[in-house]
């Protein structure tokens, strides 16, 4: 396993960081989002401390990627560990980085030979060409999330938008879908692909409207779910039935179950669920909340890719203090 000791900086900025990261992308279209934004803003004013740059360009150089393959040795483990995180995927690494910034000494253990989980890279050939193991694309706000976790003045890993050059109508294609013998369907930034979907299914306009309504509700439920995690667990159990009823409705059904309620047109279902691979599970297993996010929510701003490769994401988190 890999052992990473993440040194700590005494600050309570993690609460503010999570709040800003959630509030910025969703900017306020519903009362739930407004409540989440207000709550996180209050937490930010209370907890935020001045940020201290802890990751330098030199540390992010490809020559320093050895930190991502630092093999485990008992002699490397300090005696005064506060927290041990099992797994160095993005969830584990961001958790470890946030804990480190609140003053803890954190040890991250990984069974693979390098950090990153689905964002790790591997090398092939005499030239050591780098390939990503799993990351297709991510959201543009990932750069902001990494900045909040590391405490840098600038984005430690810039995120570049994917897609072809912008068309005259302002659209930019970043994904293509093939369904049967139909012409290729282009998924576009700012959800401009929905116009083409309506053209292909003139008799299913009400179904498309119903999909948009349900997908919006699924995406809008996320801020309140995250906001609820600011409260002690006992409070969460009391508040959950009121605050999270929409979240439970959306996350508690699969993509297949949700689409069966939205339309009876099998081909339209295929289009709605065509990006299921981005959720990590097939439609009969993936949460509807994730299915709505990748076909409806993500195209609001488009897909992005970390400059320098996805391994840079876990690398910058490894230096958090």
Image: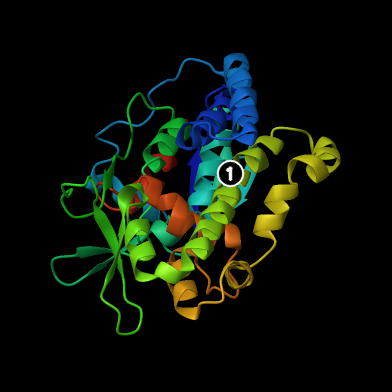
Residue at image position (42%, 51%) is 298
Judge left or right: residue 296 versus residue 45. Answer: left
Q: Is residue 19 above or below residue 301?
A: above
Judge left or right: residue 222 versus residue 161. Answer: right
Q: Nearer the viewer, residue 256 or 88?
A: 256
Residue at image position (37%, 58%) is 194
Q: Nearer the viewer, residue 268 or 230?
A: 268
Q: Which residue is mark 1?
A: 220
Q: Position of residue 48 (x, y in %)?
A: 55, 18
- State which quadrant residue 98 falls in: top right
The single residue placed furthest to the bottom in the displayed view is 181
Residue at image position (50%, 79%) is 266
Q: Nearer the viewer, residue 115 or 302?
A: 302
The colour scheme applied to this rendered structure is rainbow
Query: Does the image show residue 222?
Result: yes
Judge left or right: residue 179 versus residue 254. Answer: left
Query: Does the image show residue 74?
Result: no
Q: Count numbered badges in the picture.
A: 1
Residue at image position (57%, 40%) is 106
Q: Position of residue 231 (x, y in %)?
A: 75, 33
Query: Dot 1: what SS?
Result: helix
Q: Position of residue 236 (x, y in %)?
A: 79, 39
Q: Position of residue 200 (x, y in %)?
A: 35, 70
Mark 1, other Cα within 10 Å: few <14 / some 14–19 / many ≥20: many
């Amino acid at each position: 396993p890999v052992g990473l000791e993440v040194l700590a900086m005494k600050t309570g900025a993690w609460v503010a960081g999570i709040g800003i990261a959630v509030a910025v992308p969703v900017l306020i279209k519903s009362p739930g989002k407004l409540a989440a934004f207000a709550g996180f803003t209050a937490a930010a004013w209370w907890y935020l401390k001045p940020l201290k740059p802890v990751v330098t360009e030199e540390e992010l150089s490809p020559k320093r990627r050895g930190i991502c393959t630092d093999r485990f040795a008992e002699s490397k483990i300090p005696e005064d560990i506060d927290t041990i995180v099992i797994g160095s995927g993005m969830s584990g690494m961001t958790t470890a980085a946030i804990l480190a910034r609140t003053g803890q000494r954190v040890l991250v253990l990984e069974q693979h030979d390098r950090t990153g989980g689905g964002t790790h890279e591997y090398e092939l050939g005499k030239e050591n060409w780098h390939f990503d193991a799993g990351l297709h694309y991510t959201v543009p706000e990932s750069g902001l999330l990494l900045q909040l976790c590391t405490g840098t003045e600038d984005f430690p890993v810039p995120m570049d938008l994917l897609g072809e050059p912008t068309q005259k109508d302002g659209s930019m294609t970043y994904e293509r879908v093939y369904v049967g013998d139909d012409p290729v369907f282009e998924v576009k930034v700012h959800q401009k692909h929905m116009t083409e979907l309506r053209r292909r299914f003139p008799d299913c306009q009400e179904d498309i409207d119903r999909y948009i309504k349900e997908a919006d509700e699924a995406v809008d439920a996320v801020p309140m779910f995250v906001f609820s995690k600011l409260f002690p667990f006992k409070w969460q159990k009391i508040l959950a039935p009121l605050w999270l009823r929409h979240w439970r409705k959306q996350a508690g059904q699969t993509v297949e179950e949700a689409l069966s309620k939205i339309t009876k047109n099998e081909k339209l279902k295929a289009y709605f669920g065509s990006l299921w691979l981005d959720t990590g599970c097939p439609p009969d297993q993936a949460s509807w909340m994730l299915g709505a996010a990748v076909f409806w929510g993500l195209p609001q701003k488009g897909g992005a890719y970390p400059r320098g490769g996805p391994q840079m994401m876990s690398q910058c988190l490894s230096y958090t203090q």
